[in-house]
Amino acid sequence: MRKWLRGRLIEVSPQTLLVDDGDKLWRLAVRCEVGSLVTADFVELQVDFAVPGESLESVSAASLLARPVGTGQPFPSPGGDYFRINRDRRRQILTQRGRALATIRGYFSRHDFLEIEAPLIVPSPGLELHLQGFSVADARPEVPPRYLITSPEYQLKRLLVAGLPRIYSLGKVFRSGEAGPHHNPEFTMLEWYRAFAGWESVATDVAALAAELATAIHGSPRFTRHDDRGQKQLIDLSLPWPQRTVRQVVQELANLDIRGDESVDELAQKIEHGGYRIPQPTLRNEQDEPCWAWDDLFFSVFLDHVESKLALPDSDGVLRPMVLCDWPRPLCALARRKPGFPEVVERFEAYVAGLELCNGFGELCDPAEQRQRFVQDLAERQRRGLSAYPIDERFLSALAEGLPPSGGVALGVDRLLMLLLDAKHIRDVLPFAADEL
């Protein structure tokens, strides 16, 4: 049996050819004249499938389609894209990435969500203290700066106000200053909202979607991956995912009882009495004295002594997800306060193997409270020497028109793929990391 094969020569010898046809690598025995062919050529080959007693398919005819006009450098070049993408598992991962994105869209289509193409250039990138945006200058000097989007939250909520009850966005967002194994300044965010639902509904979506993706890739929501030391981990994303409050987890893993309504001084005393190091003050008060920020104190304990322990296996040696809910009020962002529990807000994050995958809210609908938070965040940004971004007035106007009770969540697609595809660095699941452009 014969077939025609088009591809690129990766290796050439008098006995064999190694050909990349875009889907796989073929090691072919030479049965014809190929003396004029060289590595990197684009070729068309007539391939005879192996007969009993032969281990390789063989080439019975070959023709040159194109020859790159190179500079004499070897192929694959260590500094080139072919080497970069094919060196490890990256090409395979990118193929799986494409299929995963199709699975994500299939999930939301089956659940009657409308996909929204969010704008990438917006009047404000958001005022949360941990966010830094990229400014975009217009060719017309009289036009004020705009910003690359850090999240499509404001725009999607305006569409909730407009009457679209189930919406999602799957696309790029941009955050300046983010780098490391789990961060790239440009990354893919999946964000979705359910009107007339609470945060519990979108948290269920997160679990169901992750389990579906794991099953599509591994055949089961239970799969193995390797930790940073190369040790195997058994992950199980089966539903339901357990839920714990932040207060419970911090008390259990760090032996601190943090309610969420402590003053900065009270929180510092709790941390110090618990035997933990107090971080150096990063701010100065009105009297020009060093002082702490509530969030810096909290995360000095949470990141080092709580989050890392969320990667520990259970008694069966299995790593299971955990949904952390009821976050302290000072970490409110755009979440509403929990009714009857004013010290916490309706915010949740999902963790798997110590990796934070998403951040979701029971959404704040009160325009007056939201404006007050924006004003406070803007003042705090200025106090910390951070960029002072504009308040998005059209978003506040939409809230005043009426945002239905809603749950929403933003999920880092690249991080989820890192987990599912056993990648150690975010660059491994991207076609181009920031330093590869």
Image (tube, rainbow, N blue to C red):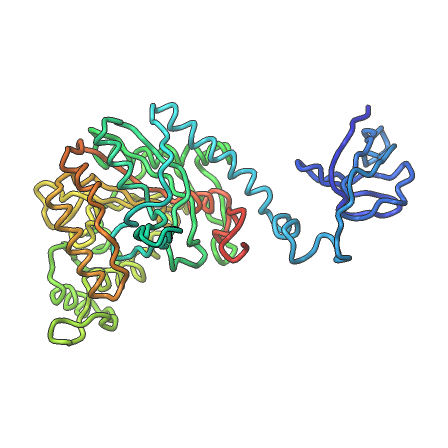
| Image position of 308 with respect to 28: above or below | below
Q: Residue at x 42, y 59 (%)?
A: 179
- Could you tell me residue 315's position as x and y percent? 36, 47
- Answer whether residue 312 is visible to the viewer in this image: no
In the shown orientation, is residue 211 left or right of residue 247? Answer: right
| Image position of 390 with respect to 202: above or below | below
- Answer whether residue 106 is visible to the viewer in this image: yes
In the picture, residue 286 is in which quadrant?
Answer: bottom left
Along the viewing direction, whichever of 48 and 273 lies nearer the viewer: 48
Q: How many marks?
A: 0
- Could you tell me residue 81's position as x and y percent? 63, 51
The N terminus lies in quadrant: top right
- Could you tell me residue 16's position as x and y percent? 84, 43
Q: Residue at x 74, y 41 (%)?
A: 8
Q: Residue at x 48, y 57 (%)?
A: 228
- Could you tell me residue 351's position as x and y percent? 34, 47
